[in-house]
Amino acid sequence: MTGATARVRKAFAFEKPDRTPLFEIFQPYHPIYWPVCGRTVATDAALAWDAMTDGIAWEELVETWAQAQFQINRFFGVDMVRLNDAPGRNYTRPRKLGPARWALDGTLYGVNARTKMVEPLDPGQGAADSARQNEDELRRKILAWDGSPGGRRTTDPVLRRVQDLASAAGEEWVYMGEIGCGTGVAFYPPFMLMWLAEEPGLVRRWIEMQMASALPRTQRMVADGCSVIALGGDVSCDKGPFLSPRMYREFILPAIRRHVQIVHEAGARAVYTSDGNHWLIKDDLFFNSGVDGYKEVDKAAGMTWPRLIAEGVYGRVCIIGNLDARHTLCHGTADDVRREVLECLRYGQTGPGGHILHASHSVHEDVKAENYVAAVNAYREFFGMARLPW
């Protein structure tokens, strides 16, 4: 039994597929799209910002985004895909200031000459969203919450359109949805970290508020065809978890377990998604949570294949990784990439299954396009497949 669905199913079931499944997330506007899809409002950030300045129709944005994501995933021959949302129906229009210059919500933007992405001209204006939240406003919102869910529960139009395109082309893909429920501690504003110690009830209520929205949306994603759900969110950095093991167990683990339960009841697989070094919370994150897989396996932070095997993670949790997207894919040579891919695949083949090849985060703005192509060519070489027509 072959095909993407069988490969991914066997990987999660720790059975030997015909070849290791391939998965990737391609960041919007990355230049890797250009040789495959051309430069469009879905692949070139400057074109997109100019088009939104002019008021491009939302329907055109959705169609162009769907076409680009269908084409890039088809070109690289992935088995599992995770799609990026198009700008919202009521997106805010930027204001054009000059060549490659815009203003949006009081911030000035320009094109980064190295990455080709549109970024704030003043790095200080690119502060994390967590630093922009007002403590008093958030407290009032939490205390006023009446227990009702919020947020979108409708089908993602990009997902629907890509599914149609794939079906028409005879492509069989496994779709991954991604949604958090307030457990990504790395994104907590500083005052919320203080709340954990001083006002723990407020944090618990906030997490309940996030879950009230996230759980129905999770069910909607599965109903719409996402048989794998990525959840969790960043909880660690290179030096270890942002919370003590006790706090992780008290505040985060119950929410993760509830989210995993909802995913399983809907008939899908649950994948924990977080960068960083998790060894201090290994048992809770990997085993007590009930997750089926682990994504964003951060080799550079110490989540290496030998230790994943030695600590018993590999064999109990499907490893979705472990290509280094911090160093090798960004700064290495094609030969460096090839060696790492072959090493990673060999480690993944030490068991009957339980491995899906993936970069440690995504094809993000610092990943060299030629290095990701080299990675897929090494994968194809390992399994006796033809090289990409790049």
Image (cartoon, rainbow, N blue to C red):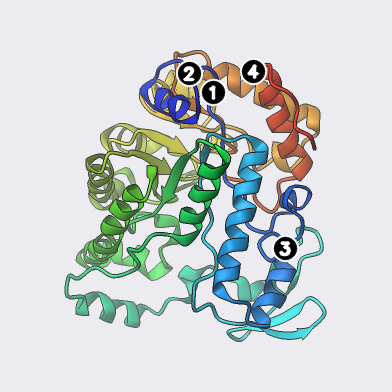
Residue 209 visible at all: yes
Mark 4 near mark 1, Cβ–Cβ under 8 Å?
Answer: yes
Alpha-carbon distance for marks 4 and 1?
9 Å
Mark 4 highlights which residue?
383
Q: Amino acid at mark 4?
A: Phe
Give the image location of residue 2, x and y in percent: 49, 21
Mark 3 vs mark 1: give the one in front: 3
Closer to the N terminus: mark 3 or mark 1?
A: 1
Quick one: SS at disc 2? loop
Labelled disc at residue 55: none
Which residue is outermost to the left? 146
What's the residue at 27%, 61% (across, down)? 207
Alpha-carbon distance for marks 3 and 1?
32 Å
Q: Nearer the viewer, residue 246 or 294?
A: 294
Mark 3 highlights which residue?
40
Mark 2 highlights which residue?
17
- Quadrant where the N terminus sits is top left
Q: Amino acid at mark 1?
A: Thr
Quick one: SS at disc 1? loop
Quick one: SS at disc 3? loop
Compared to residue 273, the image places residue 199 above or below, namely: below
- Quadrant where the C terminus sits is top right
Alpha-carbon distance for marks 4 and 2?
12 Å
Classify residue 64 by image quadrant: bottom right
Closer to the N terminus: mark 4 or mark 3?
A: 3
Labelled disc at residue 20: 1
Compared to residue 206, the image places residue 89 above or below, namely: below
What's the residue at 40%, 80% (across, down)? 134
Alpha-carbon distance for marks 2 and 1?
7 Å
Give the image location of residue 78, x and y in percent: 58, 35
Q: Amino acid at mark 3?
A: Thr
Q: Amino acid at mark 2?
A: Pro
